Image (cartoon, coloured by chain):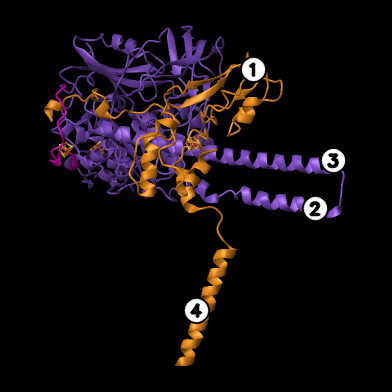
Chain colours: A orange, B purple
Amino acid sequence: MIAAIVALSALAGVAGLLLGFAAVRFKVEGDPIVDKIDAILPQTQCGQCGYAGCRPYAEAIAAGEADINQCPPGGEAGIVALAELLGRDPKPLNPEHGREKPKMVAVIDEQSCIGCTLCIQACPVDAILGAAKHMHTVIARECTGCELCVAPCPVDCIHMVPIAETITSWKWTCPIADTEVRPSVDRAAA
Amino acid sequence: MSRLFPFHGGLKTVRHKTESNQQAIRPAPVPRRLVVPLRQHIGAIAKPLVQPGDRVLKGQMIGQAEGYISAAVHAPTSGVVTALDQRPVPHPSGLADWCVTVESDGEERWVERKPVDYHRLHPSELRNLLRNAGVVGLGGAAFPSAVKLNLSGHCDRLETLILNGAECEPWITCDDRLMRERAAGIVAGLHIIAHLLEPREVLIGIEDDKPEAIAAMTAACAGTGYQVRVVPTRYPSGSVKQLVKLLTGRETPVDGLPVDVGVQCFNVATAHTIHRAVDYGEPVISRVVTVTGQVRQPGNVEALLGTPFVELVELCGGYQDGVERLIMGGPMMGFALHGDEVPVTKATNCILAASAEQLTPDRPVMPCIRCGACVDVCPANLLPQQLYWHARAKEFDKAQDYHLFSCIECGCCSYVCPSRIPLVQYYRYAKNEIWAQEKEKQKAELARQRHQARLERLEREKQEREAKLRQKAPPRSEPAVAKPTLETAVARAKTSPAPTLETTAETVNRDG
Ligand code: SF4
Ligand code: SF4
Ligand code: SF4
């Protein structure tokens, strides 16, 4: 009986040690809560939150160093999602970090571009193509609209333009904000 | 005779069929200018093959199918391409889309048409032929037919092939007239579909308010084994999942397609175009359109794709007084247009000029009284008022829990709601928001990966620069060279976390 208890305790002890060792030795890279926060952030990588990108901001939130209302591109929806994830109350966007704006895309005036490559160095997602002394251009599909390339341009040839609504991006609006009721014939006959 | 399996809900609507179904289909004249949208189907827009200045022949391909779900587009008549630009198209947004404008030369010169013997073609060749002939569902959804003619990945053996001639929308009669006048052509197309899909049985569903069409189709099916099934007039029996239930008793799974339960469904007009494409070598360049409502001589016209709506209205005697709104499609499932200059597309089954009395009186919308009327009529077995609450509160996850994407936007719930809540508009809004969020997420994921890649590249470049500097510097002692590299390697391992696989897995498509 006692032998059995001793044997089992010993086994349990060994197993515990093994597990403990494994937890240290095979520690999973990345922090799941940081990943979850990062998944909510819009990945614009603009730095308006005061950090070097979305992931550093996510790390700061996770560490309790930053508040959840510092990301203008994420806007109200982003704050609500963060609040829900972290079990906190939503709050308005902190205006110190900027305001929520419609989605934009950077456009380089290719006539004026002198090929200085400064914008390429500024772009956080490598969405600008070009080589030294050659005209540069923005891959619109990959531009996050962070505006980081605008200031460095010495000839001011980069402009942010709102993304135009197309037939594929157009959305039905919420009827609350829309007095137009869809057509329906012969309702009276119902 | 044969059993029917009624679907839940639905409505008896007031019929307005006789306004337009009394005369034969009239051919519309060739307009001077045709504006042919490159996106007339669900899926990827066709790639333009012509430039302004090019001469084109009738039936010549001017837009090539791109991607798996797509269909080709053709010149509806011979003439000169005068523009390749964005023009208003029939769409609820009123926005413009890419179109090819063809100035007609009045000669109607065809490209070479090659009829084929479909028995000699491999199924994939036949599907390709239909894709290149621009065949899409003409019931209104405009889904590329070639995709639906490929069963692989869905079911091994097709149980039932359904030809949809129900035409349940109260004002539309284009399929009715087509069945009356061209039943033989429809059945010829049905042969081709059946040849590809090899179903165990072929059923043709027609609502009982079309006795002439039923007679014509029954006669044309004699000796084929195809069975005409008369279904009661009940909106929306022409909706695919409802018709499948009605005729076979099979329930299409919530996130599935009828083909997942061994049933495939095609519209009668689609079958007719398949027949023309295969047996005559003619691509889809025209369709029958019901022009009805407040026009002087309502009826059905066969119009070239690209014909401005206004020319069809004029052909039908012009507008009567009191037109309040122009609708494409029926009153239940259609949408209001922003103008009558837009061109006929493959999805244009009906142009309805609705008067103010026919439209909803602009009575104020009242709060939901939870009467449950919407639940009783929903043919998709949904809880419309729950969907409404969640859509309104922007609780899209919850709306999805209540199967928002099973809503077929039939409008039955809005029709009966005593509080006149525009329910369907809420569902369309919620669906669009969910799609947009999904797209945003994918875009964010791309940005995350690119940003990560950039950080890694910068780090690598820094290492390389440092390594170069060290090489240039005079070697003082042997280990001094080896040690820093080891240190930097460790530092690098610390600063750049391994790219996480989980983040990519998160973006796997949800519904839609
Ligand atoms: S403010 Fe910019 S960098 Fe900061 S989390 Fe938002 S998008 Fe990312
Ligand atoms: S029919 Fe209208 S009022 Fe009645 S429960 Fe449905 S949404 Fe509410
Ligand atoms: S519109 Fe949607 S929710 Fe309303 S009755 Fe039709 S399927 Fe049901």
The circle on residue B472 is 3
Q: Which residue is mark 2?
A: B482
Q: Amino acid at mark 3?
A: Lys
Which residue: 51% across, 21% down?
A160
Q: CA distance from mark 3 to mark 2?
A: 15 Å
Q: Secondary structure at mark 2?
A: helix
Q: CA distance from mark 4 to mark 1?
A: 70 Å
Q: Is residue B255 above or below residue A144?
A: below
Is disc 1 on the same chain as disc 3? Answer: no
User: Residue B329: image x %, image y %?
Assistant: 29, 24
- Chain of the residue that carries numbered disc 4 in the rendered image: A
Q: Are marks 3 and 2 in contact (CB under 8 Å)?
A: no
- Chain of the residue that carries numbered disc 3 in the rendered image: B
**Sooner in the amino-acid sequence: mark 3 or mark 2:** 3
Over which residues does the magenta segment extend? Answer: B362-375
Q: Secondary structure at mark 1?
A: loop
Label 1: few (<14), some (14–19) or many (≥20) C-alpha neighbours in 10 Å: many
Q: Amino acid at mark 2?
A: Ala
Q: Is residue B336 above or below residue B492?
A: above
> In the image, is A157 to the left or to the right of B459?
left
Q: Which residue is mark 4?
A: A12
Is disc 3 on the same chain as disc 4? Answer: no
Q: CA distance from mark 1 to mark 2?
A: 44 Å
Q: Nearer the viewer, residue B466 or B176?
A: B466
